[in-house]
Amino acid sequence: MQEIDFYLVDAFSDTSFGGNPAAVCPLKAWLPDETLLKMAQQHNQSETAFFVCHKGGIELRWFTTLTEVNLCGHATLATAYVLFNELDYPDSRIHFETASGTLTVTREGEWMTLDFPACPTEAQTPPPEMLAALGVDHYVDARKGRAWVVVLDNQLQVEALSPTISAMTPGEHKVAVTARGDNGYDFVSRFFSPGVAVWEDPVTGSSHTMLIPYWSEKLNKTALFARQVSARGGDVRCEVKGNRVLMSGKASLYLKGSVFLR
């Protein structure tokens, strides 16, 4: 029997039941991919992060309940929280080796900052089927990067969306819906990716790699404050630095224990 430490962390939130929960499991060595996927399915979170520390650095991977993904912001933030607060990581900066290259997380007080590659987007016409599934009959702008970005008139329209999720699969299923924000927020968003078993992601770092450069250009600002207006919700401090984006947030430990593999 193998015993593995387990943490459940609410990322992009400083309280329980907010932000985006991620499971985090430190490993001594990589287990078979089939085992990692079964563990993620058992945890039943939008993402489970697995990491292995070795002399050359820290390798990090992310799994949904359906597949491995090549980039995940909130689970990276959750992993950094575990290293900083539960495993006594000695530095204020962590470098993760991932499928998306080296990703860095720095800590300043309770805030942790992700340093991710910016994702460019280009104007495209979204599929009518996707818009119909979202319940969108009018949009201001639409672009395509690592996922779709659909821009609406205002925050209320983003909050009011009630997509028909089943109509988004198969087909175009990764989409961030966004608008200018109210009450001190520069922009707001929601993110849907049912094709990888994430019906609606509460707070999504990967979508902000597209949204931050877009809104930085539109608002002529390099530092922005964003909120993902899902049911759980979460705040993200944002900054553009060349071809990189910085995303800062807090995190809260909800659960820790052990996983037993037989």
Image (tube, grey):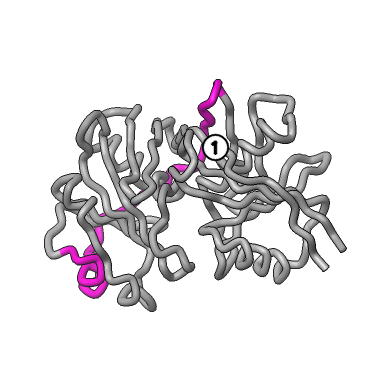
Write the residue at 82% across / 50% down: 28
**Left or right of residue 78, residue 249 in this image:** left
List x then y, in percent, for residue 196.
Answer: 48, 67
Write the residue at 53% across / 30% down: 112
Residue 244 seen in render: no
Eyeballing the image, is 46 above or below 194? Answer: above
Residue that mark 1 sits on: 252
Amino acid on which disc 1 is placed = Ser
**Left or right of residue 31, residue 24 in this image:** left
Write the residue at 58% across / 34% down: 105
Q: Residues within 10 Å of mark 1 (few under 14, many from 20)?
A: many
**Left or right of residue 225, residue 181 in this image:** left
**Where is residue 138, by image quadrant?**
bottom left
**Is residue 68 on the magenta stretch?**
no
- SS of the residue at dot 1? strand
List x then y, in percent, for residue 69.
Answer: 55, 60
Residue 142 seen in render: yes
For the record, the magenta segment spans 108-136
**Left or right of residue 41, residue 12 in this image:** left
**Is residue 131 on the magenta stretch?**
yes
**Where is residue 217, by image quadrant?**
top left
